[in-house]
Amino acid sequence: MAEKPRFRWHIVVFLAPAVLVYTAVMIYPLFNTLRLSLFTEVDQSRVYVGLQNFRTLFGDAVWSTQFWNALGNNFWFFIIHMLVQNPIGIALAAILSHPKLRFAAFYRSAIFIPTILSFVIVGFAWKLILSPIWGIAPGMLDAVGLKSLYAPWLGKEEYALTTLSLVSVWQFVGIPMMLIYAALLSIPDEILEAAEVEGITGLSAFWKIKLPLILPSIGIISILTFVANFNAFDLIYAAQGALAGPDFSTDILGTFMYRTFFGFQLQLGDPHMGSTIASAMFAIILVGVCLYLFGIQSRMRRYQF
Amino acid sequence: MNAARQNRFNTFAAHGALILYTLIALFPVFIIVINSFKDRRSIFREPLALPNAESFSMIGYETVLKQGDFFLYFQNSMIVTVGSLFFILLFGAMAAFALAEYRFKGNTLMGLYLALGIMIPIRIGTVAILEMMVQTGLVNTLWALILVYTAQGSPLAVFILSEFMRQVSDDLKNAGRIDGLSEYRIFFRLVLPLVRPAMATVAVFNMIPIWNDLWFPLILAPAEEVKTLTLGSQVFIGQFVTDWNAVLSALSLAILPVLALYVIFSRQLIRGITSGAVK
């Protein structure tokens, strides 16, 4: 065994393809985008300008109004998901996880169907259903005597963003439902039986026993929701177009970045300002993920069964 | 009140809530599909009615199939999805094997480096990705999309697959080594077949987001001959906004393939999620 250990080439061969593609197509462009945000174009050549683009984004009145508008809308989008999507998902999972419930597999599969549809389908389908021209929504409200509540929600500035958030909630409720369902199934029966002996059943068993045990999963869902929401684009683009109408009331960071990068109508596309917005998005997502990892996850007690 | 009656009431309430939500989930899809089979007048007059002999019409589908090149779009989506899944699974499994099987310097670091990509969305790098694809001439090719989706899907694939590969018995691999099998053969002949269920889970997780993505086809491959079905239907519907028959039929045509995939793979998908593959 005096022979020196040979270099194990096979490890390199196994790792190389994934690491190369990942580095070249994901990590390198990510940092390159951050770098590009420090440049601008003057006379068709790239000039280093330091933090000038960020100063424009936050300091220039036209840019900063758009940015804060998009960021504010994005927070509202996220809040609706946290307040509506995740509680509904948890409630559905709690009902589904009842051991003696019949047809559970059917309900589970059916409720998950919207999640597999593309944003294009979801955006247009809801646009048609809510449209005053087709009249499905007003007709149905009329049938229950609430016709006066109807408004062309997607066309009104004050309702459009909330309506789209709820459409997105409709689409993605399946994900928290499935993840919480999985977490609830993994709670051992002995714990629930012990609680039952103590007289804790039904709803109080859910609040006192199950909910504390699935808190880590709720944390994961929250951070997944956060990353997905601050990276959203498709639904708004499919339903309202790149201008995120009416009057930018549904503009979020994804559509703002797309418009800036590619240009629209009279404004020319600007890759450097696009990178600047992307960098801001990166910072926001990074802050959120770090808050979760160091602030929430590390403090949460994990129960080992 | 006795417990039995209380129980029956609870069951009733549970089914009521679930049926209500199932209706909410399926109603829009149902409305779109039934109306795509009606003529224009009935779409507006009785949107909630099923198509009958009088209102039945395929005019929307005829327009769609005449105007849009949906077979080409479908084919492009198929190539992109299958191609990306192939590379995600192959490259992901190889890297996962290296990380799970061998001890070497930088193993943990490499694992962390790859795990970064699970949380950070690849879209942030879009500006530089487009620039790179333009420079390499890959823009408006399906390869651009396949590369991006492979990069995007690999981190989670490595993470999930390496968990599973740690469970493959060492005795089996060592027996192979004694028989003189090379490390490559051990991987392809012994280990890969054993983690097939995990590979299926990874495939199902990646399939739907890739098929449904609008952002990268829009930016990297908007040309007519490389349009995916998602982008193709988006553009088509945008052009035919006033032709309700055509729009409803195009939506139904876009729903059907995903629905078919879901029916085929839903057990795998649900088992994958509930077995804790994404914890």
Image: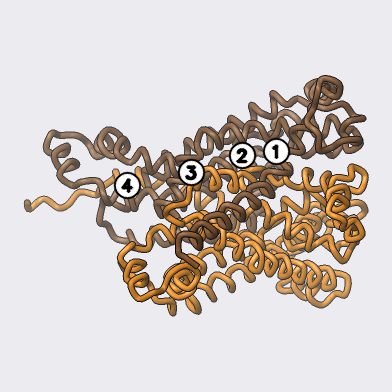
Q: Is residue A297 depicted above or below B167 in this figure?
A: below
Whether the residues at callouts 2 and 1 have beta carbons within 8 Å, the answer is: yes
Closer to the chain start, of discs 2 and 3, is 2
Residue drawn at point x = 50 percent, y = 69 percent: A203
Marks 4 and 1 sit apart, C-alpha to C-alpha, by 34 Å
Q: Determine the image quadrant of residue A85.
A: bottom right
Residue drawn at point x = 71 percent, y = 70 percent: A75
Marks 3 and 4 sit apart, C-alpha to C-alpha, by 23 Å
Left/right of residue B30 with respect to residue B276 in the rendered view: right
Q: Which mark is residue B211?
A: 2
The amino acid beneath tag 3 is Leu
Q: Is residue B38 depicted above or below B139 in this figure?
A: above
Closer to the chain start, of discs 3 and 4, is 4
The amino acid beneath tag 1 is Thr
Marks 3 and 1 sit apart, C-alpha to C-alpha, by 21 Å
Q: Is residue A202 depicted above or below A29 in this figure?
A: below
Whether the residues at callouts 2 and 3 have beta carbons within 8 Å, the answer is: no
Q: Which residue is mark 3?
A: B269
- Judging from the image, mark 2 belongs to the subunit labelled B
Q: Which mark is residue B230?
A: 1
- Count residues near mark 2 (Cα–Cα under 10 Å), then give few for <14, some for 14-19, many for 20+: many
Residue drawn at point x = 56 percent, y = 42 percent: B147
